[in-house]
Image (spheres, rainbow, N blue to C red):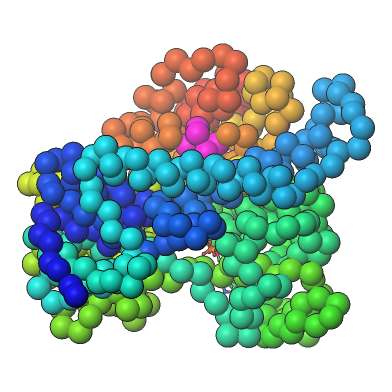
Amino acid sequence: MSEQQQFDVVVIGGGPAGYHAAIRAAQLGLKTACVDAALGKDGKPALGGTCLRVGCIPSKALLDSSRQFWNMGHIFDQHGISFGKAAIDVKKMVARKDAIVKQFTGGIAALFKANKVSTFFGFGQLQPGNVVAVKQHDGSTVELKGTNVILAAGSDSIELPFAKFGEHIVDNVGALDFDKVPKRLGVIGAGVIGLELGSVWKRLGSEVTILEGLPDFLPAADKEVSKLAAREFKKQGLDIRLGCKVSNTEVKKDGVHVSYTDDKGEQSIVVDKLLVCVGRRPATKALLADGTGVQLSPRGQIEVDEHCHTGVDGVWAIGDCVRGPMLAHKGFEEGIAVAELIAGLPGHVNFDTIPYVIYTEPELAWVGKTEEQLKAEGIPYKAGSFPFAAVGRAVAMAEPAGFVKVLAHAETDTILGMHLIGANVSELVHEGVLAMEFKGSADDLARICHAHPSLSEAVHDAAMAVHKRAIHKAN
Ligand code: NAI
């Protein structure tokens, strides 16, 4: 028997975009509900979406564990530290990751409670008339009528037709939960997930082979950054093969046989586990009942305008299920902006200053345009770069690889992009984000006092290098 409850805002999806929208709406005094279908590893409802359960947070936990292990074998000696043979207890490492996930998914539940967001655990479907039908985990159905409905359903891994997920062929979810280090790990797709999770298992001892379809490595990154990244990853032993067209996989007794063609012809590898990470698609299947008026693009994305409005009165969509990069923090900002727009405030998201980070070693990060984009768009620019090898703090940390590059308009000096590779650049990139958000110039950044010794000095000197006045290198 179905009952109908009335809310100012009903959010479908309790991931990064959805929980931000729900909490901000509740802060603004709107009566808010959030619907989420996901279950944690313990079979209980778990808020926080892909990011908290099987994405950003657990992968960072494993990246950190594996980095400590790698440093024991490869870096500690430089510091004069020796010890017995390093060993890894994978089950303990995974249990630590699971505990972190539980802490954070539980944290969202606590935040919902504190902000008086009503939570409904089950699958929500939008019906005509801004009604959300929730099929709850106990089998009952509840109907929520929202003056506004925000669709934040997220995304799912793309499965290749010839590589069905199972015990041996996995997506990010499976690759976060191996019970031992696979001797041979194959990865299809040298994107963000392939590089991050490939790094985790490589550091722990797997032989990792990454097959990438495109002929170029990380084409979205600035070319100098991707070139150095490829060199550093090769040094670590990651075998990244470009221009590989994977045609088939077969699970046999001795492992997963992966067939592909490259410029030399037909090839194959045999691996113990195969991670397929060739992108994600919007999770919009079954999200919309007939007659809602909400439109999907051919790629399954919910069509929205620049304010995340679907064109249907009171229906909005945010996060991975709409256009734009599939990044948790892009979803955060859209969630906040839409809640504020609903409350009559001027919410907005600046797509030009969204930072991108890949949490490998070294880390990669960027904001704004690459040199290649500026050239293609005919925008006159000046570039200044500075290597971490000349930064005292980086060398003291035994992290000399990488550089910071600042790109500024040749006439106005306005910062147009910042590209970084090196230690902790996931944090440093925000100097570029802030400067660009405030329409700052390379000269502004160059004249800001930076602490010495700190990694941020690379940003400072790179900004000075735009005008050929870097202090710590020849200009
Ligand atoms: P991705 O789009 O980053 O990379 C997929 C890669 O697979 C691309 O290089 C593509 O050329 C390649 N590819 C596609 N089809 C292929 C095929 N048939 N054979 C060989 N290669 C093929 O997608 P990924 O790594 O799956 O990540 C999914 C999403 O999750 C991305 O949008 C990413 O931004 C997000 N994410 C972000 C993280 C971060 O911000 N640090 C961490 C992990 C995921």
In the picture, which quadrant includes the N terminus?
Answer: bottom left
- Residue 161's place in the image compared with 111, above or below, is below
Q: Quadrant of residue 472?
A: top right
Residue 350 lies left or right of residue 312; in this view the side is: right
Q: Residue at x 34, y 40 (%)?
A: 110
428 part of magenta stretch: yes
> Please, is residue 342 above or below residue 415 in the view?
below
Q: Residue at x 43, y 71 (%)?
A: 281
Identified at 24% across, 58% down, the residue is 11
In terms of depth relative to the viewer, which is nearer, 279 or 82? Answer: 82
Ligand 1's image quarter is bottom right
Residue 236 screen position, x and y as percent: 78, 48
Residue drawn where x is 56% and y is 14% of the image: 452
User: As displayed, is residue 454 above or below residue 338?
Assistant: above
Residue 108 picture quarter: top left
Q: Judge left or right: residue 307 versus residue 195.
A: left
Q: Nearer the viewer, residue 76 or 450?
A: 76
Residue 376 location, x and y as percent?
43, 60
Horizontal side of 235 relative to 458 (left or right) equals right
Q: In the rendered image, is residue 338 in sight?
A: no
- Residue 276 part of the magenta segment: no
Residue 219 position, x and y percent, is 55, 61
Q: Which residues are magenta?
A: 425-429
Instruction: Where is residue 118? Give x, y as percent.
Output: 23, 51
Nearest to the observer: residue 123 or residue 15 = 123
Q: Is residue 341 left or right of residue 64?
A: left
User: Does any portion of residue 441 appear in the rendered image?
Assistant: yes
Q: Quadrant of the C terminus?
A: top right
Question: Chief secondary structure of the magenta span?
Answer: helix
Residue at the far right: name it.
Answer: 84
User: Total number of numbered labels?
Assistant: 0
